[in-house]
Amino acid sequence: MGLLLGWLIVMTRLWMIRGRLSGPQVVIPYNILTPFIIYFIAELFGVSGILAVVAAGMVHGWQSDLLKLSSSRLQITTNSAWELLSSVLNGVVFVLLGISFPEVLNELRDHSVHNLNLLIFVGISLYIVMVLVRFLWVWFGLVKLPHEDNQSKLKDSMLIAINGIHGTITMAMAFSLPLSLNRNFNYGRADLIFISAIVIGLSLLVPAVVLKLILPAKKPSYTETELDEAKGNAINAGIDRIRHYPDSQNLKAVIQILNSQRYLAPVMDEKRVKSLLDEAKQIEQATITAMVKDNKISDSEAAQYKQMAIVMYDRYSRNIWIDYWNWIIPFSKLNRESRKLNRELKRQVRGGNKLSKAQLQAERHQWIIKMNQVQREPYEAITNYLDNLPNPFERPEIMLVRAFYDQRQRFWNRTSEEQTAQNEMLTIAFQEEYSYVQNLINNGDISSQLGNKVFDEIANDQILYMQRNDRDS
């Protein structure tokens, strides 16, 4: 049953991939629900649901090469989701075992027909047999692994034999048994749970002791300082590669994104940051007031700009989880202010007339262009203030405040053409980082272990940027 259902699941996945139904929002729920569906179908036909799920998982593993037809992004997202879910389920197993174990012991003491020492002996014996079978499975080549000689073959066989947590499937099967069988509560359910707990405990304790004896101490071939230096040099190589681009505004934005890859975060003086931000706010307010006085903007435009600035300042100063909570709660202060601002914007745009969706979007685009024009003078005034401070490009507090206003300014100015140009420069910069690290490895300047670590970090940064870009677009 499990083999058949597993095959059907894989064929359905392939059909979804060919039919372009392979987005993470479709595939991940499908994968998570698959074992539950298989379990209930198997139970409906009167066979073991757990064994059916295990068999289906084996088929899924055998056919994993076919599922690699999906996109790299989908595979990365799916693997991350399964790793998270696996960690959660492993924790649930031990929580469930810890909660139920005292009750199992009481039931064994009061009702079990077997001696407790006998159950412990059975658990230890099963663990030894299981380790021996796994050892022989590898030793006789049923698992294809490259071995240099018999000594390495022996070592690999021992490692595979004792590694991993064993007994969880047996315990899951024991928990799935009914509490009573023909009104008999003492038919051995507690005995099976106790034996599986012994196997699980041994599979945790034995590797913790044996692995320290047969494996050398793990010593990385690089230090954290060397890792920081190697990644910093790769980032510098990527920045140097794109410096010739004439588009200074987009280049500045891309360089800031690349610099955010660096490991070492500078120590900030929070009071100094708050003082600089307060001073910048005052300059902004004074500039807007002067623009109204000089008839460069209207009172309504100044009020709209101030409202938008308040929202951005609030999002900067709040904790990200508080910000998220305020956005999802419909009656929060932030949501009320946002709805009020949207109503005001619609009223300003429509002028009392009903507009179509296309007209409303066109008018809103014109409003964004106008707000972009309004924010230029305050931005220039704040930038000049920061530039005239002592050591403006060396003090982390000044750089942080500057980054906030630069990011806000790019928000107003961002267009699809600019986003495309930034993506192009970032692609070239990331590729240069990969090439730089590969050259260091080829020349023997860094170890392959350090190079692989830097490769992983660059790839993670690139994926993070792509996900953030998709979310913001």
Image: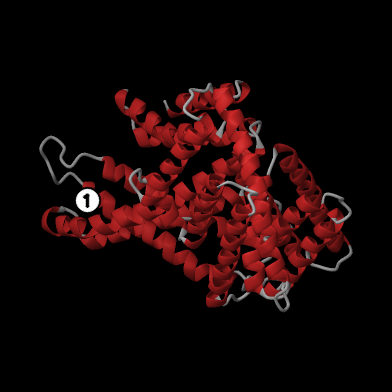
Does residue 212 sit above or below 295 in this rendering? Answer: below
Which quadrant: the C terminus?
top right
Residue type (three-letter) at the residue carrying disc 1: Ala
Crowd band around label 1 with a 10 angstrom C-alpha radius: few (<14), some (14–19), many (20+): many
Residue 399 image point, x, y percent: 67, 68
Q: Is residue 465 visible?
A: no
Residue 47 in the figure: left or right of residue 238 = left
Does residue 412 sit above or below 268 in this rendering? Answer: above
Q: Nearer the viewer, residue 89 or 460?
A: 460
Residue 361 in the figure: left or right of residue 186 = right
Residue 225 image point, x, y percent: 70, 75
- Could you tell me which secondary element the residue under label 1 belongs to? helix
Q: Residue at x 70, y 64 (%)?
A: 383
Residue 9 in the figure: left or right of residue 72 = left
Q: Nearer the viewer, residue 201 or 235?
A: 235
Q: Residue at x 56, y 37 (%)?
A: 61
- Quadrant in the rendering for residue 360: top right
Residue 294 image point, x, y percent: 64, 54
Which quadrant: the N terminus?
top left
Q: Which residue is mark 1?
A: 190
Residue 436 image point, x, y percent: 84, 59
Seen from this angle, which residue lies furthest front? 294
